Amino acid sequence: MIEEILNKVLKFEGVKETQKFTNQFISLYGIPLYKDGLDLILTKAREGVVVFEVKIVKGWNTDDGCCVTEEKKIYNQILKTFTRKLDHKIIIRNFAVNVMAHEFAHCVASESGFELNEDFRKAIGFDMKDRKPESVVLASEIKRLMVDALKAYPANKILSELFARYFELLSTSRDVDSQGSFLSSQVTEFFVNTSKWIEQVFNPQIKSQIDPDIAAYTANLIANQDFKTEKKFADNTKSFHKKIDSEGQKSWSRNVNSNAAWQQSWQKHQELEDKK
C-alpha cells in the first residue's frame, strides 16, 4: 500500500528510485511517536495534497531541506464560507533518513492546523534547560541540532525548527539506523515533557485526519515479525545501555529518576495553568 501511494506522488529528477524512497519512509515507523505523523503524510499523499520531488544533489547540506506549503482559500457552497486548503511539496535532495524525517515533520506540523504554542515551548524548555543526557553522543547531537544550528534562525521560526529537529534526532537512533549510537527511548526519556506533549496533545489533534485504512495497515506492518526483526538490536537493550554509558545501568537509572522529577515539575506547571 505505501509504495502504491507514494509512487503516484513521487517525481524524480534523474533515476527513479521509488523502492529506496519507500524503504526509508517505512524505516521511520521504527519511531512509535512518529506513527500518527507518517500516517497523516500518507493520507494527504493519497488525497494528492502532499507531493514529493526527489532531486539528489551530491554534497548537498543535509540541514537545508525544503517543504513548500501553499495555502488556498476555497469557497464551500454548503457552509457558505471559505475553507483553508494546503498543498505541500516536499523536496528531497538527499536520501538520508534524517533529512526526510525533518521535512516530513514540517509538513505534519503545518497540516495539523495546530499552533506550536507556549505549552510546546515550555515543555521543550523544561527538558533542555541546564540539563544533559547521560549519553555523550546524544548530548553532542542535541547541541549540534537543537542549539548551535538554531542560532542563525529568526525567533518566529525556532519552535517549528525544534519540532522538526526533534523528529530528526529520533531518526538517527538505532530504532531507525542500525549504525545509530543511541536508542529512541533515550531521546524520549530525556525529552520527557516534549514527548508527552506530542503523544497526549499533538497526536490526538491529527488522528481525526488520518485515513483509518492507512492507520490499520501501518499498525499491522509495525506488528509484523519481519519488521520487528529488522529493527532488532544487536544484543539487548540493557547491554547496549551499559556499552554507551561508562557507569552502566546505575547511571541510566539515575537519568530516568531525573527525568521523572522534571516531568513532575511540568505537571505542577500544568496544574497551575489549569487553575487560571
Image (spheres, rainbow, N blue to C red):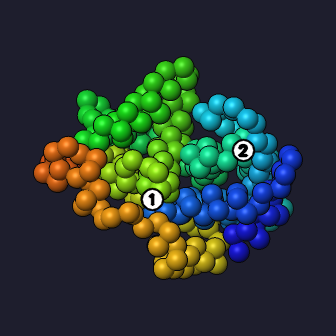
* Pick the front one: 166 or 114: 166
Percent x, y for residue 119?
A: 39, 42
Q: Quadrant of residue 49?
A: bottom right
Residue 124 location (% of width, % of height): 37, 40
Q: Quadrant of residue 91?
A: top right
**Residue, x 34% and y 46% (percent of image)?**
191
Give the answer, above or below, for where 56 lies relative to 18: above
The amino acid sitting under disc 1 is: Asp
**What residue is pinned by disc 1?**
175
46 shown above or below 243: below
Q: Which mark is residue 92?
A: 2
The numbered disc on residue 221 is none
Helix, strand or loop status at disc 1: loop
Residue type of the residue flagged with mark 2: Ile
- Left or right: 202 in relation to 78: left
Q: Position of residue 56 (x, y in %)?
A: 76, 42
